[in-house]
Image (cartoon, helix red, strand yellow):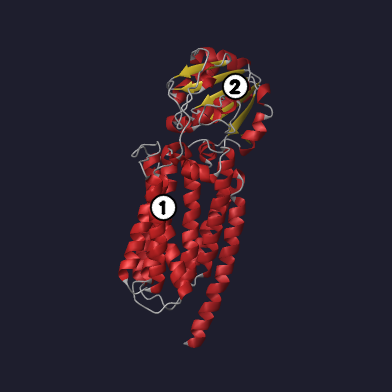
Amino acid sequence: MQTLTSNHAVLINFVYVIAAALFIFGLKLLGHPSTARKGNLLSSLAMLLAIVVTLLDLAIVNYQLIVIAIMAGAVVGVFAARLVAMTKMPEMVSLLNGIGGLASLFVAWSTMVTPTSLPPFILIVTYLALLIGGVTFSGSVVAWGKLSERIVGRPIMFRGQAVVNGLIVLAVIACGVLFVMFPQQPIYLWSAMGLALLFGVMLVIPIGGADMPVVISLLNSYSGLAACAAGFALHNNILIVAGSLVGASGIILTQIMCKAMNRSLLNVLFSGFQSVSNETMVIEGEVKALSADDAYYVLEAAQSVVVIPGYGMAVAQAQHAMKELQVLLEANGAEVAYAIHPVAGRMPGHMNVLLAEADVSYEQLFEMDEINKRIENFDVAMVIGANDVVNPAAREMKGSPIYGMPVINADLAKNVFVLKRGMASGFAGVDNPLFFKPNSRMIFGDAKDTLNSIIRQFDN
C-alpha cells in the first residue's frame, strides 16, 4: 500500500508540473487577442488535468459527490456562458471572481472543521485564505450590484467611515492573533468569516462605478491570492502555482488600468473618502445634430475612418452592424480602424471581446497611444457609445474630476460623429465638451438603428 501511495504521489506531482507549464503558456497566449482563445483553452485543459489527477489521491473517498459537483458546475457554466448578454459580461466576471473567493473561504473553513493540532504556519495561511476569500466574495457582490445598477453607482459614504474601516482592520488583526493562539475555539473562526465579509463590503461601497473596471481586476487578483493561501493550507502545489499566477497577473492588470486613468491604486480605493472639487465646468459651444442620411454622404467621401466603441455599443448590440458598415467602407476605398481605450466598457478587454464576436480583425484594433499619434489624419471619428474615454475635459479642464486621465483624442479628427441616445453624461457622471466642439455632430438614436440606416444608403 505504501508503494502504491508513493507512485500516486509521483504521478500527481508530475501531472502538476505539466499543468503548471500549461497555465504559464496559456497566460502568455492570453496577452494578445489573436491567441487569447487558445490560451483560454490551454488553461482550461490544465485545470482539468489538475482536477482529474487530484482525484487519484487515496484520501478522497466520496467520488459520487465530486462527480455530481463537476456535472452541476459544467451545466451551470455552459448555460451561463450561452445565455449571458454581452452587456452583462462584466457583472458575470465579477460574480465569478466572488465565487472563486467563496471557494477559498470554504476550503479554509473545512480545514478547521475537525479540531486537530496544526502548526502555526498552516493556521496563518488558513486565516489568510479565509480573510481574502471573504473579502473577495462580498466585495465582488457589491461590484456586481454597482455594475448591474442594483446598487447606486456613485460612492456610498457616511460620516466616520474611515474610522469604522480602521476599527474593522484592528478587529481582523486581533481575531487573527486569537485564531492562531486558540484554533479550537470556533468563535474566532466564525468571527473571522463575518469580519472578512463585512470588510469586503466596506472596501468597495465607497468606490464609484466608473472605477469598477479597476476593482474587477483587483478582486481577480484577490481571488488568486486566496487560492494560493488555500494551496499552502492544503499542501497542494498546483493550487499554489495557479493562485500565484492569477494573483500576479491581476495585480499587473490593475496597474495597467490605473495607468490608463492616470491614477494610483490608493487613489482609486480611497478617493471616496476625499473631498471632491466643486469647481464648475464651463462648456462653450452648441450641440449640432446630424441625421443618419447626412452622415452617409460624409462617410461615402471619407478615405479614413476610426471607430471608438464604448459600453453603449454593447447595450445597442451594434457591433455586427458596425462590421457590416466597415466592409462597405473598405469596399469604397476607405481605411477603417478601431481605437480601444484600456478602460472602455465595464471591464478590462470588454471592447476586444465585443468586436471579436463580430469577427473584426485583430489587426484593425489599435491601442489608445498608437491611435492618438495619427488621429488628426482621420477624416471621420465615429464614437459609438463611448463617453468618458473620449472626453477632452481630461486634457482641457482642471476642474474636471477626470482631469489628467489619458483619453482618445477623438476631437482632433477632421469630423466627429457621436452616436448616442441622448445627452446624458457617461458612467463617471462628467459632462463631455466633445459634444459641443465645432467639428462634432451628434447622431441621436439607437446606435444599431443608426448604423443600419447608413448601411441602407450604401446599398442604394
What's the residue at 43%, 67% (across, down)? 126
Indicate the position of residue 254 as horizontal and vertical percent values: 54, 47
Residue where numbered disc 2 is placed = 411
Q: Secondary structure at mark 1?
A: helix
Give the residue type at disc 2.
Asp
Asked whether the viewer can see residue 375, the reply is yes
Residue holding disc 1? 166
Q: CA distance from mark 1 to mark 2?
A: 44 Å
User: Which one is nearer the viewer's eye here, 50 or 327?
Assistant: 50
* Image point (50%, 17%), residue name: 442
232 to the left or right of 192:
right
Amino acid type shown at disc 1: Gly
Disc 1 packing (10 Å; few <14; some 14–19; many ≥20): few
Measured as percent of width and height from the top left, residue 150 is found at 33, 39
User: Residue 223 appears at what percent x and percent y?
Assistant: 46, 56
In the rendered view, would you say 162 is above or below 292?
Answer: below
Q: Residues within 10 Å of mark 2 (few under 14, many from 20)?
A: many
